[in-house]
Image: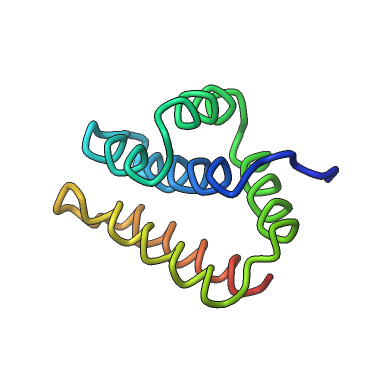
Amino acid sequence: MKTIDWTKDELVAYILLFAANADLKETPEERDFIISKVDKETFQEIHEEFNRDNDYQGLKKITTSLEQHLYDKDDIDLLLEDIRVLFFMDDDFDITEQNMLKSLTRLFKAL
């Protein structure tokens, strides 16, 4: 894939949106959490892009951008912790979210 012209905030917003939609429902609490990590304008712009992408495109964009921004182990650990917090926002860490966390952990650690 070509380079992705995202800032780190845009990358974080996209990854958290990707995770928030693992169970096919994005709650207001999840939105608020994502907006607490990035500004509202960034959230809205990235949300529009996220809505246009399929899962394959999203994963390619995420991995390409993580590599471009030279995320190291500590950066990945912080990102995975934010994803865990997001998944527990509704007090229902369901099997879909559990599988998404495992998949993203494997994917991110392989970079």
Q: Position of residue 71 (x, y in %)?
A: 63, 66
Which residue sits at x=62%, y=41%? 58
Q: Position of residue 20 (x, y in %)?
A: 37, 43
Whether residue 33 is situated above or below residue 53 in the rendered picture: below
Q: Which sits in the foreground, 68 or 60?
A: 68
Q: Which sits in the foreground, 89 or 40?
A: 40
Could you tell whether 3 is left or right of 60 in the image? right
Q: Quadrant of the N terminus?
A: top right
Q: How is the image coloured?
A: rainbow
Q: Position of residue 106 (x, y in %)?
A: 56, 71
Q: Position of residue 81 (x, y in %)?
A: 37, 66
Q: Which sits in the foreground, 106 or 7?
A: 7
Which residue sits at x=46%, y=72%? 77
Asked where in the image residue 97 lies, by quadrant, the reply is bottom left
Could you tell whether 6 is left or right of 2 in the image? left
Could you tell whether 77 is left or right of 5 in the image? left
Which residue sits at x=27%, y=36%? 32
Which residue sits at x=44%, y=40%? 17
Q: Quadrant of the C terminus?
A: bottom right
Asked where in the image residue 4 lies, by quadrant, the reply is top right
Outermost residue to the left = 91
